[in-house]
Amino acid sequence: MPVAQSRQHSRIPRNLLIGSLVLLVLYSLAGFLVLPWWLKRALPDQMEQHMGWQTDVGDIRSNPFALSVEALELSAQDNDNERVLGFDRLYINLDFFELIQGVVGFEAIELEEPFIRLDLLEDYSVNFARDFQTASAREEGKPTEPAEAEEDQAPPSLYFQQITVNGGVLLFRDFTQSEKAEFRITPLDLTLSDLATWQRDDRSSDYHLQAAVGSQTLEWQGDLSITPLYSSGNLAISDVEYKTLGHFLAPYLPYDLRGGNVTARSDYELQASDVLYLTTSNGKLSVEDLAVAPGTQTEQARLTTASIAIDDIGFDLNSREARVGEITLEQPDIALARNKAGEIDWIAAFDAVAKESGKAESDTEEPDRTSEQPFRWSLAGIKVSGGRVLWQDQQPASPAELSLEQLSFSTAGISSEIEDPISYQLQAALASGGTLSLNGQLAPQPFTLEAAIAGSDIRLAAFEPYLQEAANLVIAGGTLGLDGNLDLDRQQEPLTGTFSGTAEVSGLNLQLPGSSDRLISWQTLRLAPIEYNVHPARLEIGTVTLAQPAINLIRNANSVHNIEKIVRQSETADTSTSPQQNTGEDAPFIFRIGQLMIEKGALDYTDRTLDPTFTTSLDQLNGSITGLSNVSPQQGKVSMKGRVGGSASVEAEGTIGTLGTEETSNLKLTMKDLSLPALSPYLGRYLGYGIDSGKLELDLDYEVTGSQINGSNRVLMDRLGLGQPVASEEAVNAPVKLGLALLKDSDGVIEVNLPISGDLDSPDFRVGQVVMRTFVNLLAKAATSPFSVLGSIADLAGLSGEELGQVSFEPGTARLAPGEAEKFTVLADALLERPDLLLNIRGGVSPSADGLVLLRKELAAAEGGELSEQDWDEAREAYLAGERSLEPEVLNNLASARGASMQEILRDTHDVPASQLFMLDPSRNAEVSDDGKVIVGFTLDLR
């Protein structure tokens, strides 16, 4: 027994050794041969079963002693025979010591040159999920329901000492948009070390991920913990091209990216436990060479920047707070265009996308966020340098183009506390000329604005298209300067505000389109100070100084003045058909001008309706108008002096009532030493003669109440001399020279007062034309009724003009009737004062009145001085019946005697030169007055 037991004990080690060797051999065979063989066959089957992919594996190796598996040259194709997955080498090495501790530990996982094709399909699913669901449905007849995860199930204990991915390729294809997009991310490199799925308070894993799409790179590095989920590190995305951004932003961005590279980096910290915790800090974003167009149809980019930089970006999810440092834009260039329909390209593109998104959001119920903490944000400031803004406007009849260049803009800090004021500064130069600057403070809510505005040498010609919308004018020259403060406040409705400052327009030159002639110009127009109130609307200007204003007024051959062409016909039509009405709801606009100063003003006037053309000028106009306002009671004063025609002086004095009311205004105008030949084209039209000599003085006194005008026009013409006849259809049909001679006094002066009245609103009423017509009518009356002109002289003698033109004689004698001798005194004075006047004396008899008296005298003489009444009655009846007559010379002698008597009285008694008295052939049909006196008349003529 002892020997047997001894032998039995000696076999145990041997058997153990043999068993161990057998197990080792079997383990080795299984590890080196069976496992690779099984994996090489099972893996394609599993891929086919679960994904529907055809998979090829080049080789699989395993080392049971190293606990490692290595697969080579794997490639999988989907149902479309397109490669979807693959790698050159996959190496997995388990950690034996971790295994014996109950942890699945991986000492190393190495993946070399992996390939993954990820397709985002039209329904926003991915190809992996699609293929898995398709394969599951084919195997079981219906889609596989995802397994429900058990709540609070702890993850398996896994440990990864080192994970390495080298030279990976991720092919991403996007089918969600109209055109397929493809992005190849390579190389894709990842290193991950010391990662565990259980909580470790003293350790966390390190990771580093690098990926690239061409020159576009992504780098992600930091620490990672699975339980609890925690990660901190840095994420950097560099040189992302505009095409990449444009593709992913296309559904949300209303504009078309044409250029630019984006680089972003940030530190972050993420922790997921009961509450998700996420913060970012030290973030930076930069955009280089950005180019954007409003739409795909736009030929060129209309927004470009050299660079955009944003620093110090931070975000705290739990505090709901975002912090942004200063935003810096260098050389931004944006062009805005408005079409004829009034649509601005950038806004129209945005509105189109907003409308579509609005429709989608209308179907989605808004979550209730009333209980959430308000989101806070802050921005350190904005800084813009070297910018340009181009405005292109097709809406006006003439397209407009304005450009702000050398634009710089900066703001102080901005935050979600929008009631805090924000400081800002803006400076720019206009491409057309001039500079503009603004600085102040702005509070968004409630809206308040403080702005110090300054502009200098701003060329007004650039704004001509907008002026032509209201007026038919061309700006040939002129600059604008302004300096002031604008304050707006909307803390309460309506908006209130004020502007205080000064403004000046220099070198203005306005012309009509198609003409090179100056229409309106001035050297300077200065308004200082200006006080404007938004609500209620009020404008007050202290002093308006107008230096060297000039107006070139032309009346064309069609009787249309050039200034009438300023108003566009369409506007005239609109005004006549749709007059504006004041509803009375708004407070009336109030304005006041303390003083209007005019220095060295000039007016050139040309009338081409006349032949020859009439021209004159008003220059050296200086003076002031004070106290202009539309608020009662207000009375302004006018005091102006100037020169007409290069020699005549003109002065205007008066008062102006409250504008826009029925208050009365008075104006007195005096003009002296105006050369009458200068007015020859005008006077010749109505007189039928040119003016050869003479001077004109005017003393006008007008009273205007509302639209009604009443005035007197004292006109004095000194030594008016007529020139050559002028053919004119409007000339008065009367002996003009006689009329003028009658109007002249002994010194050759014509002085008349021509009163006028009328309605200034009437299109047929013109002051100048009324005055001229009144004078011509007076002249015609003088020529056709000459003695009526002498009415003023006759009035002094208690006579009328009609009485002065005739004298009465006692019937049958050359003896004047009682009271007739005074007429000769008046006539003599008129003739002596007017040496060019001639008096035509025509003696006359009445065959009835004079003949009966002479017949009775003849019969009485024949009867010895006595004549019975019966004999006289018979003789009288016979004479009247023509049965009896006087000797022919009796009546002739009486008529001649009467004429000689009148001539003698004027010549010998009143010293009228004989050269002014002419005897005419006597009249034999003189009139008889009611009281039986015989009337003999005079006529006036001109030498």
Image (cartoon, rainbow, N blue to C red):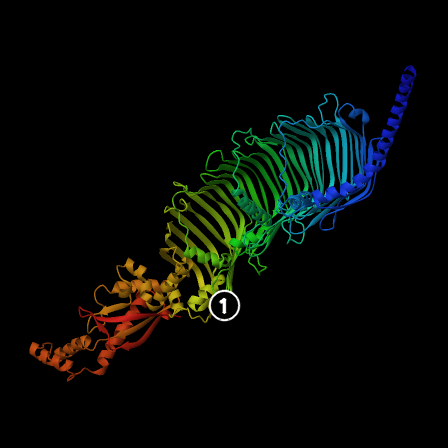
Q: Please state which of residues 816 and 795 is positioned toward the viewer in this rendering.
A: 795
Residue 929 visible in the current orientation: yes
Q: Residue furthest front?
A: 1
Identified at 48% across, 59% down, the residue is: 569
Q: Please state which of residues 815 and 800 is positioned toward the viewer in this rendering.
A: 800
Looking at the image, residue 32 sits to the left or right of residue 624; the answer is: right
Q: Please state which of residues 329 and 750 is positioned toward the viewer in this rendering.
A: 329
Residue position for label 1: 611
Residue 403 visible in the current orientation: no
Residue 759 position in % (x across, y down):
37, 55
Q: Quadrant of residue 75?
A: top right
Q: Is residue 512 above or below residue 385?
A: below
Looking at the image, residue 780 sits to the left or right of residue 154; the answer is: left
- The quarter in which the N terminus is drawn is top right
Q: Secondary structure at mark 1?
A: loop
- The quarter in which the C terminus is drawn is bottom left
Q: Please state which of residues 920 and 392 is positioned toward the viewer in this rendering.
A: 392
Which amino acid type is shown beneath numbered disc 1? Answer: Asp
Q: Quadrant of residue 585?
A: top left
Q: Residues within 10 Å of mark 1 (few under 14, many from 20)?
A: some
Count of residue discs: 1
Q: Residue furthest top?
A: 2
Residue 771 position in % (x across, y down):
40, 59
Q: Is residue 270 above or below residue 122?
A: above
Looking at the image, residue 752 sits to the left or right of residue 895; the answer is: right
Residue 526 position in % (x across, y down):
55, 43
Residue 600 position in % (x across, y down):
54, 49
